[in-house]
Image (cartoon, rainbow, N blue to C red):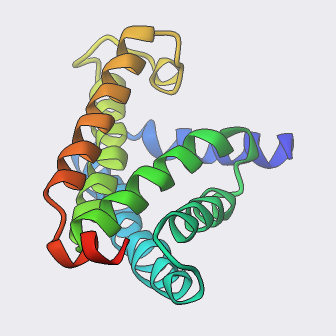
């Protein structure tokens, strides 16, 4: 598992160490846009849709899809953060009633890494690539968690009426 994780990390770093403007565009497309569209259609729209027919309520379908989403990435040491991301994206999907909401959130998540990495590699900002994935900054973690909670709360409060009646 550790070898698989290290290989995936090296490959990702190679993509993110690109310096050219065209590389930024290609990486944004390949790491930001395509996964946001494909993974949200597969894990949220299709898988949660299938699981909702098998389970009453929304929680088990969201939890199972988050587990499958995290396992799909084959990066076992990052399983818990990806599982948490899968939960957030799953609840955004079921509470908003639209796949576009988690798609946009997924794009922002992945796209931010691409853009910040490009800015770092080009010395526009002073953050190393290794620091981007480091949870050493507790302030950044707290802000991220609070932002996620706020977004989920607002999505939950504004969900469609028919969703409230079926829970």
Residue drawn at (44%, 9%) of the image: 137
Please name whichever residue, 29 or 68, is drawn nearer the observer in this view of the structure.
68
Please name whichever residue, 134 or 61, is drawn nearer the observer in this view of the structure.
61
Q: Quadrant of the C terminus?
A: bottom left
- Farthest residue to the front: give it: 165
**Quadrant of residue 159 within the rendered picture:** bottom left
- Say if 63 sits above or below 120 in the image: below
Q: Is residue 158 left or right of residue 39?
A: left
Give x and y (percent) for residue 104: 23, 59
Give x and y (percent) for residue 149: 32, 36
Query: Is residue 89 among the parts visible in the rendering?
Result: yes
**Quadrant of residue 162 within the rendered picture:** bottom left
- Say if 125 sits above or below 112 in the image: above
Query: Is residue 33 among the parts visible in the rendering?
Result: no
Give x and y (percent) for residue 16: 44, 40
Residue drawn at (54%, 20%) of the image: 134
Give x and y (percent) for residue 95: 28, 63
Residue drawn at (36%, 69%) of the image: 34
Q: Is residue 157 left or right of residue 76?
A: left
Please name whichever residue, 16 or 143, is drawn nearer the observer in this view of the structure.
143
Number of numbered discs overlaid on the protein picture:
0
Please name whichever residue, 116 or 155, is drawn nearer the observer in this view of the structure.
155
- Say if 120 sits above or below 73 in the image: above
């Amino acid at each position: 598992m550790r070898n698989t994780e290290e290989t995936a990390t090296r490959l990702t770093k190679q993509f993110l160490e690109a310096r050219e403007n065209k590389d930024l565009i290609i990486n944004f497309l390949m790491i930001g846009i395509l996964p946001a569209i494909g993974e949200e259609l597969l894990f949220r729209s299709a898988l949660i849709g299938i699981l909702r027919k098998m389970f009453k309520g929304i929680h088990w379908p969201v939890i199972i899809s988050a587990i499958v989403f995290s396992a799909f990435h084959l990066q076992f040491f990052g399983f818990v953060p990806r599982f948490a991301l899968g939960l957030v994206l799953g609840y955004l999907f079921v509470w908003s009633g639209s796949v576009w909401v988690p798609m946009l959130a997924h794009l922002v998540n992945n796209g931010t890494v691409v853009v910040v990495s490009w800015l770092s590699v080009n010395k526009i900002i002073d953050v190393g690539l290794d620091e981007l994935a480091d949870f050493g900054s507790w302030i950044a973690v707290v802000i991220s968690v609070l932002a996620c909670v706020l977004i989920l709360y607002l999505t939950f409060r504004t969900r469609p009426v028919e969703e409230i009646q079926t829970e």
